[in-house]
């Protein structure tokens, strides 16, 4: 069992020519990455859980929650390939949302914290996966301390404290783990991975009212009713 795209690719390559099964959870684009031949009939010895790209929808929700933000900043390390892959879909969706996306290059967590301190309160920050700037939760805390709202596509950043992201839209890792475990169970009982369709993860909207209150944001009841989880 693998967690993420890179481990799935490594396992697939290492086990090529064998019958050892690979179950991945999650991978954003398993067909495009060459892990499976198709979603319905994966072929080979791999299957798993697909976590569709939630970044554009997460950005859209940040824009809904903080419509007054004139700019949405994305801090990233220029040599971080994971960050670049995450930024591309944001570039594509931002104009249609009316979002002015500002890409800020930083080379260390310290530089990122310094950059956040210079942003106006009218700005917002969207957090993309950026391993080279971890822990990203620290950057979110700095942003909230400076009165800046943060959105993300990872629920782990929606802290139960006042220094978490105000909105996250993503799949649930525990739920995806359960889906993968069910696939493993079927394989152990004799079903070939090639015959097990890739499952799709369900996505959830989480809102943090504690953070919203600390930032002076008023989240409409309409959005609260749509949320799967509200931190109060």
Image: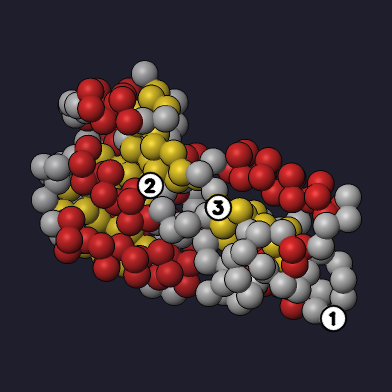
Q: Residue 134 at what x, y percent from top left? A: 49, 53
Q: Earlier in the sequence, mark 2 or mark 1?
A: 1
Q: Residue 217 at what x, y percent from top left? A: 19, 29
Query: Front-most of 211 and 3?
Result: 3
- The kind of secondary structure element at disc 3 is strand
Describe residue 165's horizontal placement relative to residue 23 as left or right.
left
- Check residue 68 in the rendering and tell me which mark sits there, or answer none: none
How crowded is the residue under tag 3: few (<14 C-alpha within 10 Å), some, or many (20+)? some
Residue 112 makes an appearance in the image: no
**Residue at mark 1:** 17
Q: How many marks?
A: 3
**Residue at mark 3:** 200
Describe residue 147's horizontal placement relative to residue 227 as left or right.
left
Residue drawn at (65%, 71%) of the image: 36
Viewer-nearest of labels 2 and 1?
Answer: 1
**Residue at mark 2:** 152
């Amino acid at each position: 069992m693998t967690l993420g795209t890179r481990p799935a690719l490594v396992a697939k390559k290492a086990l090529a020519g064998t019958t050892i099964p690979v179950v991945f959870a999650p991978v954003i684009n398993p067909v495009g990455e060459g892990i499976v031949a198709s979603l319905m009939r994966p072929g080979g010895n791999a299957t798993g859980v697909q976590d569709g790209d939630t970044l554009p929808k997460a950005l859209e929700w940040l824009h809904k929650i903080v419509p007054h933000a004139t700019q949405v900043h994305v801090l990233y390390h220029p040599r971080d390939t994971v960050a670049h892959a995450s930024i591309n879909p944001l570039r594509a969706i931002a104009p249609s949302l009316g979002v002015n996306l500002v890409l800020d290059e930083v080379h260390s967590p310290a530089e990122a914290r310094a950059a956040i301190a210079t942003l106006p309160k009218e700005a917002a920050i969207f957090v993309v996966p950026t391993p080279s700037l971890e822990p990203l939760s620290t950057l979110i805390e700095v942003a909230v301390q400076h009165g800046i709202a943060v959105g993300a596509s990872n629920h782990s950043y929606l802290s139960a404290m006042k220094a978490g992201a105000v909105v996250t839209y993503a799949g649930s890792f525990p739920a995806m783990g359960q889906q993968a475990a069910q696939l493993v169970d079927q394989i152990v009982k004799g079903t070939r991975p090639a015959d097990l369709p890739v499952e799709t993860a369900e996505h959830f909207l989480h809102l943090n009212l504690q953070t919203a209150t600390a930032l002076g944001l008023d989240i409409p009841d309409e959005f609260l009713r749509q949320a799967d989880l509200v931190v109060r």
